[in-house]
Image: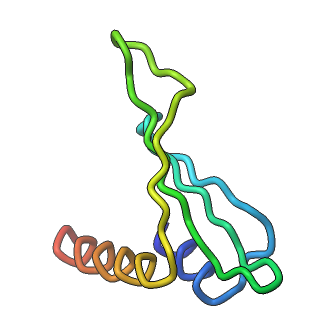
Amino acid sequence: MVAELTSLLNDEIENVELLEFYEPDVKVRLNPKCGQRDITAEFLLYPFLNGVMTEQHYVIPLYREDISQLIEYLDNFIKRVE
C-alpha cells in the first residue's frame, strides 16, 4: 500500500486504482491527477449489517497532505513491527 500511495503522490499513476485487502470491509481508491484536479484517495469502509457485508459504504476523502501523513504513519508502523 505504501508503494501505491507513493506512486500516487509522485504522479506515476495514470488510471484510477482500487486497493483491496484481506479484510473485505476496507478498500482504498487512488484517483490520479486529472487536468487541474489534484490527486486524491478515498478510504472506503463497508459496514457489516447483521453479520453480512453490504455494498453500502462510507467514504473518507484523503488529499495530498493526508496521503503524505498516512505514508509516514505506515512507514513508522512497519519499522516497529519488523
Q: Quadrant of residue 40?
A: bottom right
Residue found 53% across the figure and 55% down from its top: 28
Q: Position of residue 14 (x, y in %)?
A: 80, 75
- The one nearer the camera, 79 or 53, is 53
Vertical placement of residue 30 versus 55, above or below: below
Q: Position of residue 35 (x, y in %)?
A: 83, 83
Q: Is residue 12 left or right of residue 3?
A: right
Q: Position of residue 76 (x, y in %)?
A: 24, 79
Considering the image in quadrants, where does the C terminus appear?
A: bottom left
Residue at the limit of the structure toward the front, as seen here: 36
Residue found 73% across the figure and 76% down from its top: 13
Residue at the limit of the structure toward the left, as seen here: 80
Give the colour scheme of this rendering: rainbow
Q: Position of residue 11 (x, y in %)?
A: 69, 86
> Total number of numbered labels?
0
Residue found 47% across the figure and 55% down from its top: 43
- The one nearer the camera, 82 or 39, is 39
Residue at the limit of the structure toward the bottom, as seen here: 10
Q: Is residue 1 left or right of residue 78?
A: right
Q: Is residue 60 left or right of residue 55?
A: left
